[in-house]
């Protein structure tokens, strides 16, 4: 069997995770076919979303898959903007997500580091609580949380109220902890002997070593609040406070027959909702790679 | 590890034991001095009602600059009841909501969210003078008014004249008066290819959907019985069974669709008929890409036959509620009266085509009805409407009914008569179980 | 790099052994005052850990433990929401809510729906993600592009993807147009038999990217030598798959199964948006959707909380069983 495909040298080229691969054989073609079909299936809905959002009249037949010159318009984007005020809702989404990211970076890193490398009374308790939180569905807590946050804290229709239950992402804390655990203890002991306080150790020594993991956890944390629907929906009753995910979902539920291409308008909103997250990931995708995630969730 | 888990569990539980709100007196205003000042209101997201609402708010604000009213559309959701309910719990609902469904009033009342209007001097006579004998349907079991009857949309049959003509059916006097006539017409419409479906009420399972298929026909067939009267379900009866059999036939022969669709099936011509009130007429005027519907109106059928608009039907009323978080109740009451005055009602009628719940409509707005003779039928019907019963657990009652209806009539997986019987027994339990308001 | 201890060992270490190790953790040669020594004895060698962990601890206490406790409390009482300042009797009712939940046909149907979902979703997820990860695990052209294609659905809002899915699978949508006479009538999402499977396929598609990446990572740790040895023995690729790859990634398979089950049990957004509530005749209602409808829309949080507690117990049971099986295998 002749070897088509790559040689051992070429295997080493990709700087990321191709370290243990099956020996290159002529089976590369089957990989490409499988991956090609898979990629097509995965990406088609996105493509269709964009096409659908540009249609003047709804065209759901097979011919509608390719853009028809006479049926292209940007009007749907104008209409969804008129219905939802895309700018404001995007800003609301941004503030919501940004708040969560900030709280998770600051407090989550502290907690992850403490859980990993520091010994203190109550550490076990904190760890068990974190695990429990990861397992309990958010929806069980929604009802009492709603009463708590809106009535007792008076945070209804506020950014703080939106952010509160998501403020510190426990998955991120878990990932931080896993990464900090990988750092050798001797490193810290040496620093402690030198008289450095813990905060210094964390910021000067530990953090730089796990920076890629930090980014990975941040990217994962971004997904939650940006795409979250139920909680902001409960909390925000005023349209001016709603993030885009909520506003779009409400629009889908109550779409009046007053726009000429209701689905096109909805899809235009969907494109606007999807683009920032996708763009972010494509830009940072080299951090969203296997070893970072893999070692984080091992065990 | 086990000990840890127990400690964790105990801690968690103990933290939860400091539950429920501390007690204070419920929301009665009686005897207290009324306060005046700015208030906020919600109106529905119906385009015409928004216009009316904005006009009224602007008119009031120019007359009362120190008691400004802020109006906004009710936040969008699958049902307005869940939005209002959530807001009541949070204490964040506005003073007045011009979209209070009578079926939701018992639940809002139970939660202590509504202000009894009887507290306001002259309120009872104001309500009864304006609405007349129909007002008694809106009293709560304790005899007070927790809602102001505002407007109704008497449910009748709309039919598409173009599609009827295509099927060779008379467009001036279509045979729709008895169940058998109606069925025959429906079969002709579909088999001739004039329309995909004869009639297409929404088959989804929200609690309110029965108001647009079962309830109007039941009102007509039973001579005006409510779903529940004197604490007992009334529909496990020949009238109820006749209505169920009628709809079951329509679904079985695929004359009515069983799949939920977005958009209005009458407006886009998928269905040749609709069972709805005058608010929908605005959607039938056509827009870019789809033509207007040349519609006609017919009264509801009964098993024995009916051709008049004096037969009872469902009101599809939306009322005004004053809610517990309201601080400036004096202003709220005055604004309520302002927006239900003869002139405000007239503007509502002109702008939206919906029927204000005011007795003597045709005489009071004779010029409107002369200019819009089609709407006279709605005015006549509006004097014969029935309402959802004001009983405890009202929403769950309708949900249970809808679930049984769906299974048996729409999806045909059980016998309609058996379903009606089981719904009736479940509902009887529901309306008798709850204690009344303190 | 030191090996990361598996979760089990960590748990035991953290909970049982931590106190005893407190004293011994200090690096040799540290000098400190008596006060500090006392503090260390009570609070541990690095008491500042308390300060580091405090915000997170407070967050958990206030926004997780307390609501969880409250939810459990509500499930044992007759409870409905009231306006602020309204006091109402909330009697203890023991297990009445739980009884009502377990005998409610809608609830039972929703559990069945989740079972249907899991039966479709979990094997598909595990199988497809392993297949695609294996295919990706080589230096092939456009590798990064393929990888990006797979996780793009994962990072996109479900609301956005639901919109497209609705558009595609609607009655008369493009899928029905392509399938022509083969399309189910009524269409997928409004069809009693196809509603839940449609949701299962949607969720599989959406989450697959994340799991592919997990498998990719695990495949890195399968030693090359094992493959080479199998090749020398003349094993076919199929045999290699089953005797080398699958056992090699067993831990991740377990993890993925667990995650898929947790996600499936907590399904809400997809039934709520894709099938507008409970779907045709309640065939795509999920337990969490029912919790929302009954707890918030119908103002029966006591019933909903009981349902939620039962759901959590169910998930914990499944997780526990999984762990037991895993421990027996290793």
Image (cartoon, coloured by chain):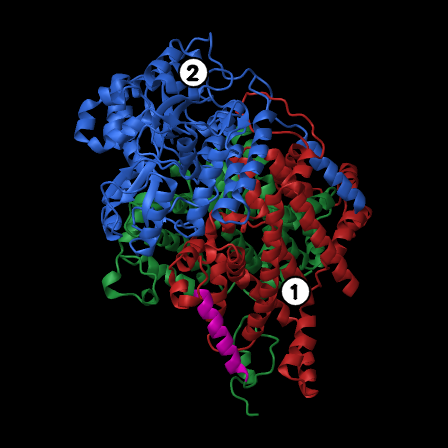
Chain colours: A green, B blue, C red
Instruction: Measure the C-alpha gap from mark 1 to mark 2.
Output: 63 Å
Chain of the residue under label 2:
B
Q: Position of residue A250 (x, y in %)?
A: 41, 43
Mark 1 and 2 residues: CB-CB less than 8 Å, in contact? no
The residue positioned farthest toward the front in the image shown: B304
Reply above or below: C300 against C221: above
In the image, farthest residue toward the right = C20
Return the mark for residue C253. Answer: 1
Are marks 1 and 2 in one subunit? no
The mark tally for this picture is 2
- Residue C296 in percent (x, y) is at 53, 36
Residue range in magenta is: A27-43
| Residue drawn at 35 percent across, 17 percent down | B132
B320 versus A130 height, above or below: above
Q: In which quarter of the image is the C terminus of chain C?
A: bottom right
Label ID, residue B410: none
Q: Residue at x 41, y 62 (%)?
A: A46
Q: Does the magenta stretch include residue A38?
A: yes
User: For mark 2, what is the residue?
Assistant: B117
For the residue labelled by badge 2, is the local secondary structure a helix, a strand or a loop?
helix
Label 2 CA crowd tier, 10 Å (few <14, some 14–19, many 20+) = many
Please check the rendered image and state whether residue A132 is part of the magenta-colored stretch, yes or no. Answer: no
Task: Read off the chain for label 1.
Answer: C
Q: Which of B289 and C13 is in front in this view?
A: B289
The main secondary structure of the magenta stretch is helix
Residue C162 appears left or right of B363? right
Locate the N terminus of chain C by quadrant: bottom right
Tell us which disc is closer to us: 1 or 2: 2
Residue A289 lies, with reference to residue C67, above or below; the image says below
* Residue A159, percent from left and from top: 46, 38
């Amino acid at each position: 069997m002749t070897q088509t495909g790559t040689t051992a040298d070429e295997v080493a080229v990709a700087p990321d995770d191709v370290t243990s691969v099956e020996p290159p054989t002529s089976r590369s073609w089957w990989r490409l076919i499988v991956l090609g079909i898979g990629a097509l299936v995965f990406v088609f809905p996105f493509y269709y979303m964009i096409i659908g959002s540009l249609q003047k009249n709804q065209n759901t037949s097979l011919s509608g898959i390719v853009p028809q010159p006479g049926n292209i318009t940007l009007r749907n984007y104008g209409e969804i903007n008129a219905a939802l005020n895309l700018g404001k809702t995007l800003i609301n989404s941004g503030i919501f997500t940004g708040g969560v990211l900030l709280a998770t970076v600051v407090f989550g890193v502290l907690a992850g580091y403490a859980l990993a490398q520091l010994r203190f009374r109550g550490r076990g308790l904190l760890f068990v609580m974190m695990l429990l939180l990861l397992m309990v569905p958010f929806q069980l807590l929604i009802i009492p949380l709603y009463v708590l946050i809106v009535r007792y804290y008076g945070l209804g229709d506020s950014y703080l109220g939106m952010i509160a239950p998501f403020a510190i992402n426990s998955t991120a804390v878990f990932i931080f902890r896993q990464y900090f655990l990988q750092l050798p203890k001797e490193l810290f002991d040496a620093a402690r002997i030198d008289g450095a306080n813990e905060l210094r150790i964390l910021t000067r020594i530990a953090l730089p070593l796990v920076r890629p993991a930090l980014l990975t956890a941040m990217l994962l944390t971004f997904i939650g609040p940006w795409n979250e629907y139920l909680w902001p929906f409960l909390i925000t009753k005023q349209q001016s406070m709603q993030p885009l995910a909520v506003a779009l979902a409400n629009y889908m539920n109550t779409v009046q027959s007053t726009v000429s291409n209701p689905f096109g308008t909805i899809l235009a909103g969907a494109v606007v909702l999807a683009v920032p997250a996708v763009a972010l990931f494509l830009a940072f995708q080299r951090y969203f790679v296997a070893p970072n995630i893999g070692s984080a969730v091992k065990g | 590890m086990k000990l840890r888990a127990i400690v964790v569990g105990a801690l968690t539980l103990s933290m939860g034991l400091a539950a429920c709100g501390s007690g204070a007196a419920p929301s009665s205003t009686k005897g207290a001095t009324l306060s005046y000042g700015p208030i906020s209101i919600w109106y529905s997201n119906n385009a015409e009602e928004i216009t009316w609402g904005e006009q009224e708010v602007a008119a009031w604000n120019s007359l009362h600059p120190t008691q400004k009213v802020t109006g906004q559309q009710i936040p969008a959701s699958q049902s307005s009841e869940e939005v209002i309910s959530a807001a009541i719990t949070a204490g964040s609902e506005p003073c007045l909501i011009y979209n209070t469904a009578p079926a939701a009033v018992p639940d809002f009342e139970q939660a202590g969210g509504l202000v009894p209007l009887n507290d306001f001097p002259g309120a009872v006579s104001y309500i009864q003078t304006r609405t007349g004998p129909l007002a008694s349907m809106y009293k709560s079991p304790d005899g007070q008014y927790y809602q102001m009857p505002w407007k109704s949309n008497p449910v009748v049959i709309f039919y598409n004249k173009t599609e009827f003509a295509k099927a060779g059916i008379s467009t001036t006097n279509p045979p729709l008066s008895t169940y058998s006539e109606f069925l025959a017409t429906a079969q002709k419409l579909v088999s001739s290819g004039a329309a995909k479906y004869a009639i297409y009420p929404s088959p989804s399972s929200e609690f309110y959907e029965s108001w647009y298929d079962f309830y109007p026909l039941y009102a007509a067939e039973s001579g005006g019985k409510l779903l529940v009267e004197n604490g007992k379900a009334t529909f496990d009866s020949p009238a109820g069974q006749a209505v169920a059999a009628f709809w079951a036939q329509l679904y079985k022969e695929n004359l009515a669709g069983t799949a939920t669709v977005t958009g209005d099936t009458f407006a886009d011509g998928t269905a040749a008929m609709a069972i709805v009130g005058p608010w929908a007429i605005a959607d039938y005027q056509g827009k870019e890409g789809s033509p207007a519907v040349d519609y006609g109106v017919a009264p509801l059928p009964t098993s024995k036959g009916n051709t008049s608009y004096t037969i009872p039907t469902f009101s599809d009323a939306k009322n005004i509620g004053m809610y517990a978080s309201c601080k400036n109740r004096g202003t709220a009451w005055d604004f309520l009266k302002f927006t239900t005055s003869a002139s405000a009602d007239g503007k509502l009628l002109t702008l939206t085509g919906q029927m204000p719940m005011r007795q003597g409509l045709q005489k009071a707005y004779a010029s409107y009805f002369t200019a819009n003779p089609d709407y006279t039928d709605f005015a006549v019907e509006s004097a014969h409407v029935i309402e959802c019963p004001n009983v405890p657990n009202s929403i769950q009652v309708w949900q249970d009914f809808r679930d049984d209806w769906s299974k048996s009539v729409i999806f045909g997986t059980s016998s309609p008569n058996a379903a009606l019987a089981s719904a009736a027994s479940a509902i009887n339990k529901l309306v008798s179980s709850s204690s009344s308001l303190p | 790099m030191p090996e990361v201890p598996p979760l089990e060992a960590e748990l035991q270490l953290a909970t049982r052994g931590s106190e005893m190790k407190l004293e011994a953790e200090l690096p040799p040669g540290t000098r400190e005052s008596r006060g500090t020594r006392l503090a260390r004895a009570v609070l541990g060698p690095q008491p500042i850990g308390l300060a580091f962990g405090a915000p997170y601890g407070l967050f958990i206490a206030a926004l997780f433990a307390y609501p969880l406790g409250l939810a459990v409390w509500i499930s044992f009482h007759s409870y409905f929401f009231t306006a602020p300042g309204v006091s109402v009797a909330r009697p203890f009712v023991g297990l009445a809510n739980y009884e009502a939940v377990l005998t409610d046909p809608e609830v039972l149907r929703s559990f069945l729906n989740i079972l249907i979902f899991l039966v479709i979703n979990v094997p598909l997820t595990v199988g497809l993600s392993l297949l695609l990860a294996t295919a990706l695990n080589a230096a092939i052209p456009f590798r990064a592009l393929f990888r990006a294609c797979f996780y793009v659905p994962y990072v996109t809002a479900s609301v956005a993807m639901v919109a497209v899915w609705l558009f595609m699978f609607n009655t008369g949508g493009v899928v029905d147009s392509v399938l022509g006479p083969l399309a189910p009538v009524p269409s997928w999402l409004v069809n009693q038999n196809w509603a839940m499977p449609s949701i299962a396929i949607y969720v599989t598609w959406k989450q697959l990217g994340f799991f592919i990446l997990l498998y990719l990572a695990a495949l890195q740790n399968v030693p090359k030598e094992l493959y080479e040895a199998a090749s020398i023995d003349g094993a076919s690729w199929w045999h290699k798959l089953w005797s080398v790859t699958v056992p090699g990634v067993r831990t991740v398979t377990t993890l993925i199964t667990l995650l898929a089950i947790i996600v499936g049990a907590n399904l809400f957004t997809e039934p709520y948006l894709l099938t507008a509530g409970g779907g045709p005749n309640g065939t795509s209602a999920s337990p969490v959707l029912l919790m929302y409808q009954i707890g918030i829309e119908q103002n029966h949080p006591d019933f909903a909380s009981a349902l939620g507690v039962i759901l959590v117990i169910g998930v914990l049971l499944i997780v526990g069983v999984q762990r037991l099986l895993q421990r027996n295998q290793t």
